[in-house]
Image: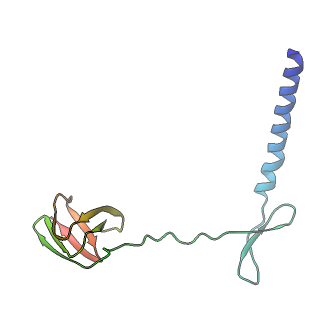
Amino acid sequence: MGKVRTILHSSIARAVALAAIVIVPAIAMDTPAAVLPTGQKVTTDTLRRAIPRMEMPSMQQRIMSSAHPVTITQQGRRLCVYSSYNQLLPIYRADGTFYQAFHLSKGTTWINGLPRGKYIINSKQYTIL
């Protein structure tokens, strides 16, 4: 019984290794992309079947602003934000990466403790020194 299992396992291992050898060259031998009259790019596999290529849209980050208008004034390293509504205020670094969303209460909210640097808030740039 032990010999039969060993032979069975070794034959399965050989079959898997052989399949890997056969499959890898088939994937590696794809032809260069062609363009159909419709403008869609395709490649052909080794059996000359057309395989459509999916184009990924560019991943551009969209900078969001507050849902309702706010008034922002800077006093030193602090920002005084006046809002007529309870809402979130997203803040981005100067390079466009998201930093943090601050919860604004109706009325005046003070934002303290921002690290030194340039920030984009509601499409305007603020510098914290």
Pick the residue in front: 88 or 47: 88
* Quadrant of res 120: bottom left
In the picture as drawn, the residue positioned furthest to the bottom comes out as 37
Q: Does 10 sit above or below residue 93?
A: above
Compared across the picture, whether 33 is left or right of 115 comes to right
Corner quadrant of residue 98:
bottom left
Q: Quadrant of the C terminus?
A: bottom left
Q: x%, y% of residue 117?
A: 22, 64
Q: Residue visible at 84% across and 60% down?
A: 46
Front-most of residues 83 and 50: 83
| Residue name at image x 20 percent, y 60 percent | 114
What residue is rendered at 81% in x and 54% in y? 26
Tag count: 0
From the viewer's perspective, is 108 left or right of 32? left
Which quadrant holds residue 103?
bottom left
* Residue toward you, 70 or 112: 70
| Figure colour scheme | rainbow
Q: Identify the residue shown where x is 16% and y is 60%.
A: 112
Q: Is residue 29 above or below residue 106?
A: above
Query: Does residue 40 sit above or below 102 in this rendering?
Result: below
Where residue 118 sits: x, y (%)? 24, 67
Give the quadrant of the N terminus: top right
- Tell me residue 92's x, y (percent): 31, 67
Residue with the most extreme left position:
75
Percent of width and height locating residue 39:
71, 81
